[in-house]
Image (spheres, helix red, strand yellow):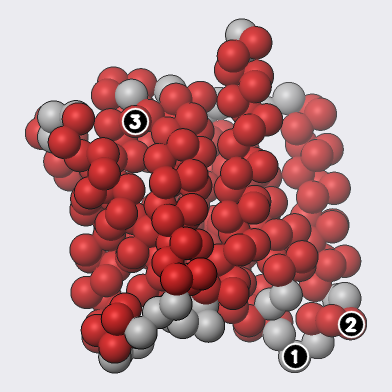
Amino acid sequence: MSRKDLVLALLVPCLLGFGFVIAKPAMESFPPILLNGLRWSLSGLLMCYFFPFPKNFIKQMFAISIIGGSVQYSLSFYGLNILDGASATLFVQAEIPFGILIAYFLLGEKTPLKNIIGIIIAFIGVIILTGSPNLEGRIIGVFILLSGTLIWSFAQVLAKPISKEIGGLALTAWLGVIAGPLTIITSFFIEGNTYNQIVNASINTWAIVVYLGIIMNIIAYSAWYHLLG
């Protein structure tokens, strides 16, 4: 791994983790699915003009957008809305062992012994954390959040070959174009009152949306997909 890639690998979890935490207060104005749809729509709108549509990967792009954009983050944000920010941030790290397992079964990537030990320790940590007193009565939130992390890991395995072909920036751009509107439409039917929630949101809430759409999506996810490729 080059020095640049190492810096990116360290930067990505910092940007994603901070965005995940500040998303929680934004859900006082925007419900989880709508918040997710707005951030993806913003990143897609800002980026799509710079990259041609990857017409050779239409089916794969729709699959990744729905699985890794609409469904996954809607579940993760719903889990975050139920749990406290610190616990949710720890649970979301289950993406790593889930990703290793899925890459092993779907891509045939070898798993070194140290990774197997790490997976075991990680899941023991999840079990211990689930029994924390501050999570009493919130197990449904844990289940929803862990479901989101599992789906995210699956989506990244699907995204890996495409990110190698078109690059991380282009992949992030067109994921936003597809996932954003689909998620907002889903929010309209499930959460309702979409128009009023958008027009009545505060400046601080929109500032969080901007962070999620630009810093978390455009910068962090583009860097992540570059590394994944």
Q: Residue 74: image x %, image y %?
A: 44, 69
Identify which residue is drawn at 24% across, 84% down: 195
**Residue assigned mark 1:** 137
Q: Tell me the element at label 1.
A: loop
Residue at position x 68%, y 30% in the image = 10
Q: Where is residue 66 shown, x and y percent of the image? A: 30, 58
Determine the CA span between mark 3 and mark 1: 41 Å
Q: Is residue 18 left or right of residue 202?
A: right
| 196 w.r.t. 41: above or below | below
Marks 3 and 2 in Cβ contact (< 8 Å): no
Vertical position of residue 30 compared to residue 52: above or below: below
The picture places residue 67, in percent across and down from the top left corner, at: 36, 56
Q: Amino acid at mark 1?
A: Gly
Q: Nearer the viewer, residue 172 or 111?
A: 172
Q: CA distance from mark 2 to mark 1?
A: 9 Å
Q: Under tag 3, what secondary structure?
A: helix
Q: Is residue 113 above or below residue 177?
A: above
Residue for badge 3: 169
> What residue is rendered at 26% in x and 39% in y?
47
Q: CA distance from mark 3 to mark 2?
A: 42 Å
Q: Earlier in the sequence, mark 3 or mark 2?
A: 2
Q: Nearer the viewer, mark 3 or mark 2?
A: 3
Observer able to see residue 138: yes
Residue 70: numbered disc: none
Considering only order in the chain, which callout, 1 or 3, is on the residue closer to the N terminus? 1
Label 2, residues with CA under 10 Å away: few <14, some 14-19, many ≥20: few
Report crowding for label 3: few under 14, some 14 to 19, many 20 or more residues within 10 A (C-alpha): many
Secondary structure found at label 2: helix
Residue type at mark 3 is Leu
- Residue 37: quadrant of the picture: bottom left
Q: Which mark is residue 133?
A: 2
Residue at the far front in the pictured view = 203
